Amino acid sequence: MKHFDDIDDDEIRIIGNEKQTVPAPRKPFWQRWWVWAVCAAVWLFLALVIIFVTKGGSRPKRPAAGQALESETVAVPPTVSKTGSAVVLVRDTTVNDVPLRLRTPVNALPELIVGIPDSTDGSLLLTFQAADIRADNHGIVGAFVCKGELLSRGVAKKGFCAILDDNIQLGMAESTPLFEEAINKEGYFFRQYPLVENGQMVENKPKGKALRHALCELEGRITVISSLDKESFHDFAQALEDLGVENALALTGGDAYGFLRDDNSGLQSWGNVRVWGNAPNVNFIAWRRAK
């Protein structure tokens, strides 16, 4: 038996292979190259997804009140119809995928007309059907005053238009002193569905789609705005609100008749006059040049 008793107290003996080395310590997990490669690939994937969602895969944001979607706005040079000092400005725009046409009478006097307007009357610049007609007795729906004459009563629709001293006032109320004032001052008054009140859209019960027209207060002027496609009351009113309309009152829609006199291209008309030609009490809001 071999004894290892030849080691002095101040000596150290190493047992084992002289060539044996201590292995180098392993790198931490986060320092390995393949970990960084995987992380880079994941971040690249997430960046592509974010770009697609925010630009390619998302719907356009709804514009703030008073703003149209610039990317969806069709800029058309205004058509000017001049008759004396009277002017009608026409322009098209699109808001929330709803194409609109704006017709703004300037320096023209508003009035109501019962019966089909005379399209050969050169003083008439712009006409739109105003109050609706009942299907059962062909009476005018809601209160209606024409040059001080009371032709109909009722509050079937809360929106109203009053024309006093050649000024148009739009509002929404079951009762308003403007009704009596229109009678006393030989003015005009009619009722229709309210679409926008004080910059906020108003919901209405009818849910079908049709071509829409509205008498609007926009940027301090009275403008008639029409949809160029069939729209629901909701979508049409929402587009008017987003366009910046302060107040809006519906006019008769669908195949309602109307016309605009343009010095360059003559008479422009829309709707079906034959449908309404024999309708009792068919009525219009019209603008004509001052005499």
Image (cartoon, rainbow, N blue to C red):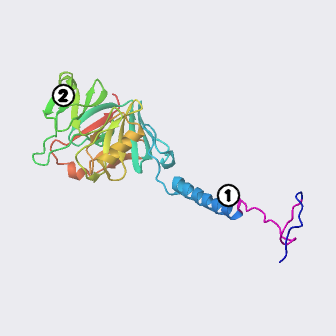
Tell me which numbered mark, 2 or 1, is placed earlier along the sequence. Answer: 1
Q: Please provide percent x and percent y for residue 123.
A: 33, 35
Instruction: Determine the secondary structure under disc 1.
Output: helix
Disc 2 marks a residue whose amino acid type is Ser
* In magenta segment, residue 127: no
Q: Nearer the viewer, residue 47 or 233?
A: 47
Magenta-colored span? 11-32
Mark 1 — residue?
30
Left or right: where 247 falls relative to 284: right
- What secondary structure prevails in the magenta region? loop
Q: On the image, which quarter does residue 159 sit in?
A: top left
Residue that numbered label 2 is attached to: 175
Splitting the image into 4 quarters, where does residue 127 fall? top left
Q: Residue at x 25, y 29 (%)?
A: 162
Q: Position of residue 217 (x, y in %)?
A: 36, 33
Q: Is residue 2 left or right of residue 180?
A: right
The quadrant of the picture occupied by the C terminus is: top left
Q: Quick check: is 20 in the magenta stretch?
A: yes
Relative to 23, say whether 266 is above or below: above
Say if residue 15 shows up in the picture.
yes
Looking at the image, the residue that sits furthest to the left is 137
- Picture disc at residue 168: none
Image x and y of residue 102, in percent: 40, 42
Q: CA distance from mark 2 to mark 1?
A: 76 Å
Q: Quadrant of the N terminus?
A: bottom right
